[in-house]
Image: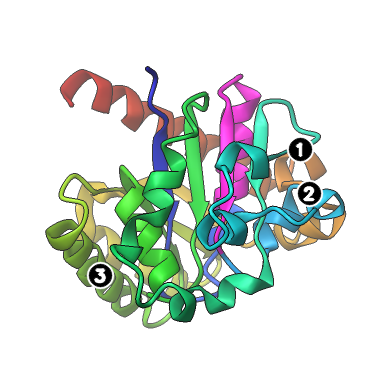
Amino acid sequence: MKKARIFSVSNQKGGVGKTTTTINLATALAAVEKKVLVVDLDPQGNATVSVGAKRRLGSKNSYTVFVGGENLKDCVCATDIPYLYVLPASKELLGVDIELADSEKPQFYLKKALEQADDFDYIFIDCPPAVGLLTMNALAASDCVIIPVQCEYLALEGVADLMKTINKIKKNFNPSLTVHGIVLTMFDGRSNLSKSIVNDVKEFFGDQVYDTLIPRNVRIPEAPSHGIPVMLYDYKSAGAQSYIKLAAEVLKREREFLIHG
């Protein structure tokens, strides 16, 4: 049976481009006819909105998978983008930490649910900007993590904190979890600070950093208001083109994984 490759897109800091990275990587892979599922675990539901799925929401979502025991396949929504599907979020996810606190092995609810997703090539989990039970479930279920890092002061500190969390998850719940890559977002080529952050992150993390830089580009924040990823909103924009390049890098690393294991 085919097993989907599962990515968590995570950073404990908010506003670094997690959702944008999630939906645009997912869209780029769907464009080359990979069947992709976006799992929206952020109670704000930005990934759900950004792929135009909000209007299709019913009573079944990622919360009902967690707490209600719903079958994941019954909760997944198709999008208008061929090969791209979404497990929508719900504001009720805010209560998951409390509701599942006394459950047996609450860190593995998502892992068990995703075992039903056997017909996808890739699954991208959009994590909330906090290390609670939702993020722990995402990391426990994932093969690897993509870490978006904004090109701003204190960026390294945020990544260092997340690395500690990843190592704890590896030790306690998911020994095969790896960092797929670190993507630098909101890069401003005119800013010495942005350039300095890029150099610092690459010096510290080396080959773990993707070569592609995601620039500050007005089309990126505009796109979600239209319910579509930026590469469909304005394919020729610098933001869209950068995510296409990033997707190519991700696929290259995936091919290397298949060769070397």
Disc 3 crowd rating (10 Å Cα; few below 14, some 14-19, many 20+) is some
According to the picture, the residue beneath numbered tag 2 turns out to be 53
Disc number placed over residue 165 in the picture, else none: 3
According to the picture, the residue beneath numbered tag 1 turns out to be 79
Q: Determine the secondary structure under disc 2.
A: loop
| Viewport quadrant of the C terminus | top left
Q: Amino acid at mark 3?
A: Thr
Residue 30 locus on image (x, y percent): 62, 28
Disc 1 crowd rating (10 Å Cα; few below 14, some 14-19, many 20+) is some
Residue 214 locus on image (x, y percent): 54, 54
| Viewport quadrant of the N terminus | top left
Q: CA distance from mark 2 to mark 1?
A: 6 Å
Residue 66 locus on image (x, y percent): 51, 59
The magenta segment: 22-41
Q: Is residue 219 visible?
A: no
Q: Measuring 66% from the left and 33% from the top, which residue is drawn there?
A: 84
Give the residue at the far left of this rendering.
171
- 247 or 213: nearer the eye? 247
